[in-house]
Structure formats: structure tokens, C-alpha cells
Image (cartoon, helix red, strand yellow):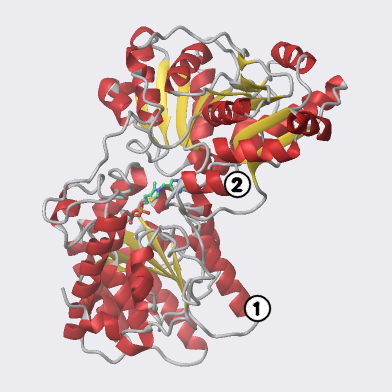
Amino acid sequence: METKLLTSVKSPKAIRNWPVAQLEELAREIRQVIIETTAQSGGHIGASLGAVELAVALHYAYDTPRDQLIWDIGHQAYAHKLLTGRGEVFATLRQLNGLSGFLKRRESEYDVWEAGHASTSLSAAMGIASARDLRHESYRVVAVIGDGALTAGMAWEAMNQIGQTKTNLVMVVNDNSMSIAPNVGAFSRYLTELRAAPAYTRMKQEVEQLLDSIPVFGGPLRKSVERIKDLLHRAVLPRNVFEELGFKYYGPIDGHNLSELIPVLRNAQLVQGPVVIHAITQKGHGYRPAEERPGEFHGPGPFEIHSGRFIKKSQPQSYSQVFSQTLVELAKTHPEIVAITAAMPDGTKLDLFQKAFPHRFFDVGIAEQHAATFSAGLALGGMRPVFAVYSTFLQRAYDQLIHDICHQDLPVILGVDRAGLVGGDGATHQGVYDIAFLRAVPNMEIAMGKDEQELRQLLAAALNIPHPVALRYPRGAGMGSDANAASLTPIPWGKGEWMVKGEDATIIAIGPMVYQALAAQEILVHEGYRIGVVNARFIKPLDSELLRQVIVGTRALITLEEHAVAGGFGSAVNEWCNDQGVSLPILNAGLPDEFIDQGATDYYLNLYELNGEGIARRVRTWLPQEERIKKQIK
Ligand SMILES: Cc1ncc(C[n+]2csc(CCOP(=O)(O)OP(=O)(O)O)c2C)c(N)n1
């Protein structure tokens, strides 16, 4: 398809005097580019197709980048990217050194706020608006937030503040009634009711027109007349939640209709104080397969445009699948098991549990903090809660973890999904900090199997542990064993596995990095090095007995993890060695102290010398001098 209009748009300034018909044509072109690009690269097509007209209308009606446009999460902002001079590089979306799948301030001056996690936009907007007011500046601040993101406490904390102050701030609610899965909760139900009340809106408009026709006199009379109008308004019409909180409410309006959107956005600019514009949109709008299967098209990999079929390489089952299937199996004989997700039933694969045990499954919305404390309550009430959550989103629930779960030593199992590098989602989503933040907390026990079989056995074992347990597992496909056919014999708790003995050095690895350690060992053994490999399995508590045996027969230690070195598994081993008075040389191999952008996991394992060859290289140069000399002499 030709994209003549879009190609001509180097910045949003270009479109500000276009007629609506031309803007509509532009929206069609943008939609086509999003479909064609994501069909190749994968990405957040559904949300982005749903926000095309919003992006066009916002850049049309506002003086961006002077006016500050903030997108919640940023996954829906592909049209924003295309309108702000990134069309030529759009094909690099989510790829190494390419455009981020979210917003990035270094990518564009139009990217005001970086996110990836939900529900931060309103707090950010309020901060920016307050700074503007304090500095007596006059630009406008607009935040776009989805109905899903409005299920998070943080959004309400911000609204609580915004509604009380009288700052000028516009909040566009992009309401498609979907989170990734269908949205949940009482507020979501409330929005549905609000959406379905055009009669209310019509009546409201009529009453407002009537009230507006009452003349307002100047001077001291003005305030009391305004107040009488306000009282009349309240008496005639019930106010919705947003109005009760102190926002002026416009809506619901059709979020795909530029002729409706643009005047409302313009009117909102005339209002003093905070405004909510409630726009009804459709996830996947304009691409039939995404409209019909919005959950699957939230963030798919590559797909065939004409059929909407996903182009999947055949892969072993994912760790998430194995985790969830195992949980279903265990739940058959453990009626106390309940499963909790924070808006990620598909991603965590807990949808399998939901199907098997609908009454023992809870989707609490994008509410990780609540999910953690809710799990604590379930445990206190005699259930065995299993909260499956991506490592990166668990960050949200840190206080709840310390204060509600660990402090009370409650037997909550955390399924820490996507632990490690995550690929296309990049810096905001890397699961490479959880060991550091979890292991500092008393009572927390942390384990990670070397493959999906061990994940199964660890989950079975965790059920017998009367403490909080975090079971980590990576994103994506497992190692390929038919895990579900294998036995569910629990792994002895706290026990690692000494796989290979080696006098020159021993690599102590955690999780699937054990296989990288074995690959390095294989390379080095051919060069005459005697390298041992330990599958640690447990990060907390460490298997002290095994470590004590290992250090007797080896001259150096290498710790290996797909996690930040700072505070990670290697740090735990260092602390243990210090504590035991062990003075062996230790090399901590892991991820550096920097945010890691999008790119294939294999690429980064190679870059940071964490794959077999990389580790072998590092070991060769690092091994204590005398070991090297010995090998060279050989
Ligand atoms: C704290 C947090 N938890 C979970 C997610 C995963 N996530 C990404 S998008 C999304 C749904 C957001 O729904 P909504 O705000 O309505 O936007 P939509 O995708 O429907 O446009 C979720 C749950 C996240 N980004 N941040």
C-alpha cells in the first residue's frame, strides 16, 4: 500500500491544518504500516491499532512537543512514533539497536515519558503539571491511560491528588474494555456501565446547555451563581466517579471518530482544572483477526497478514506452560492450592489453571501489590496461594512481599516468570533484579531449576515448605524434555547437584545457565583444564554442605547467572565464602550494572560472555596465573 501522506509527515506540525478527511486517510495509512511491520517483527499491534485516531487527534489538537503528551505503558504508541519522524526506521521496531517497542526519551523529543510498566502516566503527568505551575509556564499536559491500567492502585493514587488540586491536566481514558485479557474488576464494570449510557450523556448535555444559558454576572455574584448552578447540576444529574473526584468529564466519545475526538480535545483545552476524556476504542481496530482475537493479538510474534495465523517455529513447551500444567496436576490432589495473576492469565499460562479450577483462580487486574497481599491473606486463611508473576512486575510488590508475606512468614509461592533476559520488550521488562531484591528479605527461599523438569520437581517440593518461596523460571521455551511426562518427585529442598568435578576451577551456575556452564566445561576440558560444574538450584538458602565439599577439591570458583551481578547469585556465594573464611579466587559472571535494551537473549549472552564460548574465554584469561602457566607448559 502506498503511504504518500504518512511519508510526507516528518513531524506532527505537518498535519495541523489538514482537513478531517485527509487525517482519516492518514490514519488508514498508519494502520496499514503498523499491520505490515508487526506482521514481520511482532509487537503490540492490538493496542496500537486501537490508538491510531487518538494519536492523530492528539498531535493535531495539541502543540506537541511543547505540550507534553504522556502515554501510559507506551505499548499503544506506534502511531505516535510514526507521526513523530520515525517512519523510516519503523521496521526496526523491537529489534537490537532499533526502535524501542515502548517510548524512549533518547529516541525522540516527543517521547516525554518512558514506561513499560502500567499505570505510571497520571503520576508523571501530575509531576510535570506541578513543575509547570511552579515555574509559571503555560504548556499543556495530557496523559493517555487504558482502562486496564486504571485497575492499578497507582493510577488512583494519582487521581486522588489530581482531583484535589486544580491544575490543568487532561486524562484521556482509552477504554477498549480489555487489559491483555478482558479487563476485570468492579471499576471495569463501572466503566462498562458508563460506556453504555449514551442516554445519560445526552441528558447531561441538555442539562449543561440549560445551565450554561443562565447568565453569570461579574464580580462577587459570580461565585454564588456558579455554586447554585453546581448544586442544580448535582440535583438533576448524578455525577460519575471522575466528576466526584474533581475532574470535568467528557464522554463517552467514539475514539475512532476524528470528527468527534478533535472538538472534544480542543474544548478540553479551555477548561480550568483536570479533565477526563472518556474515549471508547476497539483493540485491534481495522484488522479483523486482531479485532476478533484481541488477547492473542496483544503482543504476538510474526503473523501472516491475510489469515491472521501466527508464524510459529515449533518449539518445546514454554516454562510458563510447564509451571501452570504442573500446578493443575498438583491442584487435583491439593484442594488448598489457589492461583493468582495480576492481569496476565495468558502470559503466565495460568489460563490453564483457570480452565481447570475456575473457582480457585483469581485475576486481580494490574495490581501486583494487591495480588501479593491478597495472597498473604489467602495463606493466612488456610489456602496455598501460588502467585505467578513476571519478575519485572514483581518489582511493584516489594513492600507487600517484605511486610505482608515475609514478615509474617506466610507460605506463599511466587512463580517468578520471565526471570532473566526477555528479548524484544527490552530494558523495562528484563527480569534481572529479582534475586537481588528477594534474597535480602528474611524467610524468603529462592530456587531455580536448570530445566523444565526441575521446575516441576521444585514446584512439587515447594508445596511442603512452610515459608515464602520464589521459584524462578525463564521466558520462552524450555530445554525440550517432555517435562509433563516425567515424574513429579520433589527435589530434596535446599539441595544442589554436583554435575562434574574439577580441580582447576568449578562453575556454580543457577537455572538454565547450568547448560552454558557444561558447554564451557566441554570446551575447556579439551584444552586440558579440569573444570567442575555445579547446578546450584537454590539461591537461598545456599546448599552449604555441597559448597563445603566443592571448595575442598577446586582451586577457583566461577559463579554464573543470567541476572545482574550486583546483589545476585554470585554475591550470595561471595557472602557465603566470606562468612566461611574461604579465600578461593572467585569470578562472578552475570549481567553488568546497566539497563539492557531489546535484543535477542543469545546476543546478550554472547556479548557479556555468558554462553559456553564466552565463559570458556573468560575462564582461560582469568584462571589464576599458576593454572594458566601449567596448561601452557603442557
Ligand atoms: C505493572 C504492569 N503489570 C503488567 C503489565 C503487562 N501489561 C502490558 S499491557 C497490559 C494491558 C494494559 O491494558 P490497558 O491499559 O487497557 O491498555 P490496552 O492494551 O488495552 O490499550 C498489561 C497487563 C505491565 N505492563 N505493567
Q: Could you tell whether 148 is left or right of 602 in the image?
A: left
Query: What's the distance in space between the residues labelled 2 and 1, CA to CA?
Result: 45 Å
Can residue 132 be spotted in the picture?
A: yes
Camera-side residue of 292 and 610: 610
Can residue 280 be seen here? The reply is no
Task: Residue at 55% x, 73% y: name it.
Answer: 129
Disc 1 target residue:
134
Q: Position of residue 629 (x, y in %)?
A: 80, 33
Q: In this rendering, is residue 101 above or below 509?
A: below
Is 328 left or right of 205, judged from the image as shown?
right
Q: Which residue, given by chain and number where applicable, does mark 2 sit on?
A: 608
Left or right, 583 with reference to 476: right
Q: Amino acid at mark 2?
A: Tyr
Residue 607 vs residue 117, the one in the foreground: 607
Mark number displayed over residue 156: none
What residue is rendered at 40% in x and 9% in y? 334
Q: Which amino acid is tagged 1?
A: Leu
Residue at image location 30% in from the left, 71% down from the top: 54
**In the picture, which quadrant includes the C terminus?**
top right
Disc 2 Cβ-to-ligand 1 distance below 8 Å: no
